[in-house]
Image (tube, rainbow, N blue to C red):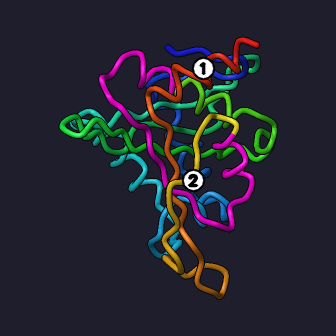
Amino acid sequence: MLIGEKVRLRGYKEEDIQLAYEYMNDPEVILNLSTGVPYPVTLEMEKQWFESQKEMKNTYNFAIEALEEGIYIGGCGINTLDLKNGVAIVGIFIGHEEYRGKGYGTDAMKVLIDFIFNQINVNKVQLNVFGFNERAIKSYKKSGFVEEGRIRQRLFRNGKYQDQIVMGILRDEYFGKYIKAMKS
């Protein structure tokens, strides 16, 4: 387990499936996770995803658990690990509505980044975020990410074309100015 100030990152458990199914059908989660059609998942699809994690290589998914309450509130992980080029592409969601906007996602991302740079030999952690997701962008900046690029009008959401933003943090940024800032 990986522990932060507010969260614990742990492996998924079978008992998480029902809540994961509910989280994946929350409109806010659906609209922010994928460029595809925001279509609900079935309980069977969520069970299949859980089973598929046993076979996955170069992806590492963690359940996010609120430390104090001990409940599963979302997920994060490495969606793609490119060891040849030293890049880990990550993602995160907070499914439990009561825990959104309260620093749980930021803490989970900080713990995930720390795990990646201290346990996996990569030079860069990267993510994609939709331009309308201002809360997530603010959280990622707090975690040390910077905007690297913008793919204009990449997806159609909420009746109009929206930008997708590419953000990243480099190893030397993390171990340099970001770690120093965390200590002061």
Q: Amino acid at mark 1?
A: Arg
Q: Position of residue 172 (x, y in %)?
A: 46, 26
Q: Mark 1 or 2 closer to N-term?
A: 1
Mark 1 residue crowding within 10 angstroms, few (<14) / some (14–19) / many (20+): many
Residue farthest left in this picture:
84
Label 1 element class? strand
Q: Nearer the viewer, residue 102 or 41?
A: 102
Q: Which mark is residue 8?
A: 1
Residue farthest bottom in this picture:
159
The residue identified by callout 2 is 147
Q: CA distance from mark 1 to mark 2?
A: 27 Å
Dividing the picture into quadrants, the one containing residue 183 is top right
Say which residue appears at 67% left-offset and 51% top-offset. 136
Mark whose residue sits in front, 1 or 2? 2
Mark 2 residue crowding within 10 angstroms, few (<14) / some (14–19) / many (20+): some
Say which residue appears at 56% left-offset and 58% top-offset. 129
Say which residue appears at 67% left-offset and 43% top-offset. 141
Relative vertical location of residue 81 with respect to residue 64 in this rendering, above or below: below
Q: Position of residue 45 (x, y in %)?
A: 39, 56
Location of the C terminus by quadrant is: top right
Q: Position of residue 146 (x, y in %)?
A: 58, 46
**Residue 173 falls left or right of residue 54:** right
Q: Which residues are magenta?
A: 113-141
